[in-house]
Image (cartoon, rainbow, N blue to C red):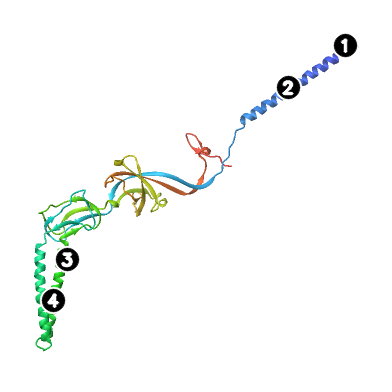
Amino acid sequence: MRIEIMTLRVLLQLLILLLLTGVLGACEKAEQGKQQQRNKKQQLVTTTQVVRGAQQQQIERSGNLRVRRIIHVHNLEEGQVKEIPWYEGDAVSQGEMLVRLDDELLLTAQRKAAAQLDEAEKNLLRLERLIKTNAISEDALIAARTEVAVTKADIDELAVRLQRTRIHADFDGLITERLVEPGDFAEKNRHLLTVIDPLSLVIEVTLSQLLLPSVNKGDAVEVQIDALGQQWHPAKIIRIHPTIDPLTGQGTVEVGFDELPSGIKSGQRATLRLAITSDEILLIPYSALQQNRERNWVYLN
């Protein structure tokens, strides 16, 4: 009887031990499951700092080359064209004669005026001697002096007109048009030649009025000329026009060269590339930007 009671106690203790072991194991597994679940829910988070700075963007615009300094040579005196030695593409230097007109009639008129002046001056000397003896009136002397002055003015006028029969280049340039030939009669104010200054080649492009405050005269730019290949040539902004087109909201910018690229010509198509720096804004790394098909966003802390 006593042995049976002891056996029951031992069995009961073993049962209790097994139950406790099972409970502890279940608790441990439950805790591990919760920990794993927590680990699954955790996400790695990297923080970054928002900074204030300027943003730079490159923009490209297209335009055509044109010359700013162009002279249409007209004659101020009429006459037959005696000499015009230049053809399209010829280079001329400042001061070189471009056109010579017939000046025979003007030279004849000048010689006639010179003779009249000589006679008028001699007559004035004679009257000045006579006035001392009261042999003539004061009015006669005044008339003689007036005749001398008018004749001198006629000679000066003829000298100016003679100068106009020879037209000279105002600057170093290129001939782009030859519109008369020797022997042609050129009536007054006829278009004879066209001369351009190749150093005045510029490119005109339009920019939005929103971008114009970000560009300044003297800013460096790059220019690619279609006819000259893929090379980019250094240039700079030389002029910003003061008006905006009210219909398009665009303003005009002119770009020039310190040194002209070889082969450059008026009318060629060109592409302008310039960097525009915005005002200071808030900047974040691109990696901090979250995106999907519908929107972009960032997390703020």
How many labels, in total?
4
Tag 4 residue: 148
Marks 1 and 2, how far apart at CA? 31 Å
Do tag 1 and tag 2 residues touch (Cβ < 8 Å)? Answer: no
Q: Residue at x 14, y 64 (%)?
A: 162
Amino acid on which the number 2 mark rests in the picture: Gly
Query: In the drawing, does residue 3 fall left or right of residue 171?
Result: right
Q: Residue 194: give x, y in percent of width and height.
A: 20, 53
Q: Quadrant of the N terminus?
A: top right
- The answer for how far apart the CA atoms under marks 2 and 4 are is 138 Å
Mark 1 or 3: in front is 3
Residue on which disc 1 sits: 4
Q: CA distance from mark 4 to mark 1?
A: 170 Å
Marks 2 and 3, how far apart at CA:
123 Å
Which residue bears the numbered disc 2? 25
5 relative position to 93: left or right: right
Please name which of the two marks, 2 or 4, marks the residue nearer to the observer: 4
Taking the spot 83% from the left edge, 16% from the top edge, the residue there is 12
Q: Is any part of residue 256 visible from this angle?
A: no
Q: Amino acid at mark 1?
A: Glu
